[in-house]
Amino acid sequence: MATEPDSWEDSIDEEAAPAPPKPPAPGFSFNPKATTFSFSPGASTFSMPVAPAVVDPAVAACFGAPAAAPAPPAPPSPAAAPTPMEEDPAPKPEKPAPPPSPPVKETPAVVASPSQPEPPKAPKASKASKAAAAVPVDFENELKGLSLKEKKKIEELIAEDDDDREHLNIVFIGHVDAGKSTLGGQILYLTGSVDERTIQKYEKEAKDKNRESWYMAYIMDTNEEERAKGKTVECGRATFTTEKKRYTILDAPGHKLYVPNMINGAAQADIGVLVIAARKGEFETGFEKGGQTREHAQLAKTLGVSKLVVVVNKMDDPSVNWSQERYDEVQSKLTPFLKQCGYNTKRDVTFSPVSGLMGFGIKDRVSKEMCPWFGGPSLFEILDGLEPQDRNRDIAVRMPVLDKHRDMGTMILGKLEAGTIVKGDDLMLMPNKVPIKVTSIFREADEVQYALPGENIRIRVTGVEEEGVSTGFVVCGTQNIGRGVKMFEAQLAILDLLEHKALFTAGYKCVMHCHTLTEEVEVVKLVHQIDPKTKLPCNKRCPFVKSGSIVVCRIATQSGSVLIEKFSDYPQLGRFTLRDEGKTIAIGKVTDFAKKKGPV
């Protein structure tokens, strides 16, 4: 991983090497056994006698001081021998000129007494030597992430935790009116997160608005505007648990005007639930060109959603009535498209028929009387049966900032993508390089001592005010803080360009979405095109590309440095999408950074 030359890692070698000893000051003489000394600001040398002694008159004359009185605590001893002094050919005036450099080099730094051939005290350690001594023994592992001591501490905290269930973030995606919010509300109701009295209240409220079937969606859509229009605007959030795992629901908006909000939600997700409306005409509207079913599936794969559960909703609708033919039709049309998006449809995609409004097929399996042709698992069984996510908790911390607010200090919200945060940790807020300290960690409403990768957490920090935190910043570990970049190299897959901008070339400006970051960017140069069949670079010159091409290009940010990572190092921070005029035109991954010395 590329790092700044002035970063912590680059300066360690300089700190670890002991600094060469400085030459002694002109005329400097020092005896470590001395108890008193006399000093004149105008003199160039001074002397410290060993034991209570009478200062030699010649020496006193050298400093411009009277032949001296002894130290007050002890009476003068005439038998005491004078302290050996540095050889001085002749007494100097009270304010002499500095001696020439050759005699200075010959003057010893320390003149010891005859009984002490060498000074017993070592020179005072510098700050650099102290920093070098503080480096842990396992230095190579420290650069990668946690030290052995920190790992042991985390293992102890995990062992003390009673709840060791895996945590998963689930994003509900799909076309508008597919039933995502209703499905999320039904899940919360079935798991006991919402009581019966609240459901009755929402049911009455929906009936007063002549929207009887919307009452379950009110659990997720808390905004009055969302309830009035029946459209999710912000990405809703809720939690529920099963016997095996803990889940966070991210209810993404389905309308095309709110795709940026959907991207923010999908960027935090581990699992995607693609909700399809089986009702006649609704599936076709969402799946045809321009429908949000297609765009959401492509964006989810780009944003790192590796597993997809396709929920065929509204199977209890009178126009469907749990029809196997309709279910098979939806499955046959979606499977090749999802394969084109990059999903392994045999391993990573699962289909399941449900009724979000009535709750059939969610917690319990659909009964044979209702749906005799389907004998598969319920939605909860599918989610609980997914393989554990591959998370590395021993590397440097990376937590993109989703939101911030003030609550007895500065609170930062986000999903911990890599590493482990422990209460009391010293971290770095990038790309501004602001040191912060974690004073509290919250998982939902509970305060915890640590957080593992994949958790949606809130941390209270010191060292930065709320105004100094912005969405798109990244909280990093001090062992490896990454780097802010203004230019990077990326591999792009061009999806579908705009009709009036059909050529993708140098100078193309658009908006980049990477983790929680939204940044205006410009294509600086097309490096080379990639042959989609051989996956090898094409040798011919590449002035422009069209829709469906794969190209390596250099991209520059417009407003300043941002923190992104190479896809090979941190995949979650190395994926991005390019959008122009409300349409996704390309998906890509960061392959390299601009090769410049110093900060970019």
Image (cartoon, helix red, strand yellow):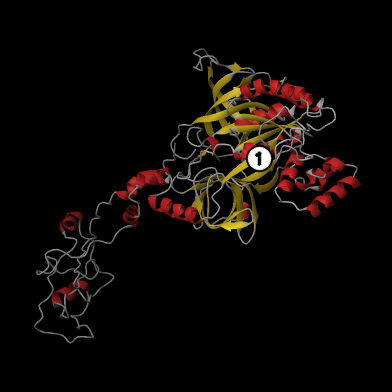
Most extreme residue toward the bottom, as rendered?
Answer: 75
Q: Residue at 56% across / 48% down in the picture?
A: 165
Dividing the picture into quadrants, the one containing residue 506 is top right
- Picture layout, residue 295 above or below residue 83: above
- Picture layout, residue 313 above or below residue 96: above
Q: Residue at 50% across / 48% down in the picture?
A: 420
- Does 336 sit left or right of 122 as displayed? right
Decide which of 530, 112 is in the foreground and name it: 530
Q: Is residue 283 visible?
A: yes
- Does 13 sit left or right of 431 as displayed? left
Dividing the picture into quadrants, the one containing residue 53 is bottom left
Decide which of 132, 144 is in the foreground and name it: 144
- Picture layout, residue 143 above or below residue 542: below
Q: Quadrant of the N terminus?
A: top left
Q: Position of residue 404 (x, y in %)?
A: 64, 51
Q: Position of residue 500 (x, y in %)?
A: 72, 20
All told, the count of numbered labels is: 1
Residue occupied by mark 1: 380
Q: Residue at 47% across / 54% down in the picture?
A: 159
Q: Is residue 510 visible?
A: no
Which amino acid type corresponds to the residue marked 1 in the rendered image? Phe
Q: Secondary structure at mark 1?
A: helix
Q: Position of residue 402 (x, y in %)?
A: 63, 45
